[in-house]
Image: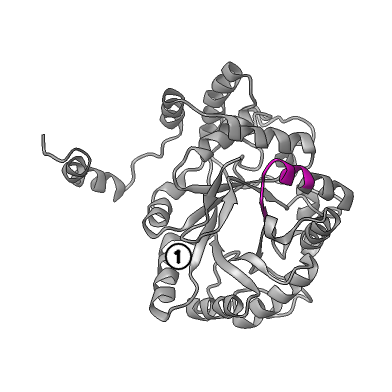
């Protein structure tokens, strides 16, 4: 397990992060379709992750209506995990509590209410990373940032992050934080896979320019890149996509990627999922990849991806089948900036 700095901070997190969406779901709810692990199963999963060197756990106040946070906090207590040995992240935005008119969003009201509830469920006195889970069109970005800065100043939160925002929204927030001297977003949690590389158009260049870390969610596209599915849509029993078809994916493109990954996986004697995760771990912008699991064996297979070192030829083969089609202004920037890039790289015009 390798460790990387989170954004422009001195905090190091493991290259894999344990996601907790499979904890505590009930009945026919969306969370029940994703996973319904009970406390003893959560304890085993978190214990196995920590034993493998994962020091980063990501949850959210809306996962299983708060039960995911409760199970996570109790597991850390049951396992007697030293607080300084684990980085705990949670999120705020979605509807919580009594479902009132102010029970969602990124208002100061909702943020300050939500963080206290999350800390209580997690049995912690602070969160290491607190992330806004989506964009709130009803709340000024400055109000959100001032509320988050208050949490940092009071010690309830160490760092702040963002999830599922567009590049212009993130850049605007970074500008406001710099202008007002507020805590800034140090990480973005976003969807990114070999079959869904849209992030590379605007967001990845922004992250690298501004020193913001990238936490990848759904690295297997909801299981579609696990190798369990065929082009007819048939899957092995128990596969999540059969009951919860998310996130949206161009299936033909995805299966072209799976075919290319399967050839590499078979040659190496590893799973297709490991190749999909390894591809992400080779991307310079990626800080950590969030992996969720229902079983220890599934988690271990994901962990084994950290040992896969793809060759230049393998990476090139995967890039050929997955590269984004040209789009304006990208193709114009590529055309016009060629000479200057060559000068930067080689020091001459020749």
The image shows residue 107, relative to residue 262, as above or below, that is below
Q: Please check the rendered image and state whether residue 53 is part of the magenta-colored stretch, yes or no.
A: yes
Seen from the viewer's position, the closer of residues 50 and 242 is 50
Q: Where does the image place residue 161, in percent across and percent down from the top left? A: 55, 64
Q: Which residue is mark 1?
A: 170
- The quarter of the picture where residue 259 lies is top right
SS assignment at label 1: helix
Note whether residue 291 is visible. Answer: yes
In this rendering, would 42 be left or right of 137? Answer: right
Q: Where does the image place residue 295, in percent across and percent down from the top left? A: 79, 39
Seen at 62% across and 71% down, the residue is 157
- The quarter of the picture where residue 173 lies is bottom left
- The quarter of the picture where residue 226 lies is top right
Seen at 72% across and 35% down, the residue is 300
* Residue range (magenta): 47-58
Note whether residue 194 is visible. Answer: no
């Amino acid at each position: 397990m390798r460790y990387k700095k989170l954004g422009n901070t001195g905090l190091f997190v493991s290259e894999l992060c344990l996601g907790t969406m499979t904890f505590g779901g009930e009945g026919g709810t969306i969370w029940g379709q994703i996973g319904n692990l009970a406390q003893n199963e959560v304890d085993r999963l978190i214990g196995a992750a920590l034993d493998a060197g994962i020091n980063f756990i990501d949850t959210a106040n809306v996962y299983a209506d708060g039960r995911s946070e409760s199970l996570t906090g109790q597991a850390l207590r049951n396992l007697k995990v030293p607080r300084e040995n684990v980085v705990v992240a949670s999120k705020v935005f979605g509807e919580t509590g009594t479902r009132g008119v102010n029970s969602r969003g990124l208002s100061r009201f909702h943020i300050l209410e939500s963080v206290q509830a999350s800390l209580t469920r997690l049995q912690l006195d602070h969160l290491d990373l607190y992330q806004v889970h989506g964009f709130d069109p009803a709340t000024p970005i400055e109000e959100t940032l001032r509320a988050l800065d208050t949490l940092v100043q009071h010690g309830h939160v160490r760092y702040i992050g963002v999830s599922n925002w567009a590049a212009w929204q993130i850049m605007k927030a970074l500008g406001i934080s710099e202008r007002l001297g507020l805590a800034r977003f140090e990480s973005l949690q976003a969807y990114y896979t070999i079959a869904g590389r849209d992030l590379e158009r605007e967001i990845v260049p922004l992250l690298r320019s501004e020193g913001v870390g990238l936490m990848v969610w759904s690295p297997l596209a909801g299981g579609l890149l696990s190798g369990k599915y065929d082009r007819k849509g048939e899957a092995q029993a128990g596969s999540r996509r059969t009951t919860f078809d998310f996130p949206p994916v161009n299936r033909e493109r995805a299966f072209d990627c799976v075919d290319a990954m399967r050839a590499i996986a078979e040659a190496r004697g590893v799973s297709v999922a490991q190749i999909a995760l390894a591809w992400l771990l080779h991307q310079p912008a990626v800080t950590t990849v969030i992996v969720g699991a229902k079983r220890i064996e599934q988690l271990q297979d994901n962990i084994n991806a950290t040992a896969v070192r793809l060759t230049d030829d393998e990476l090139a083969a995967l890039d050929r089948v997955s590269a984004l089609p040209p789009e304006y202004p990208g193709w114009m920037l590529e055309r016009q900036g060629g000479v200057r890039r060559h000068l930067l790289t080689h020091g001459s015009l020749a």
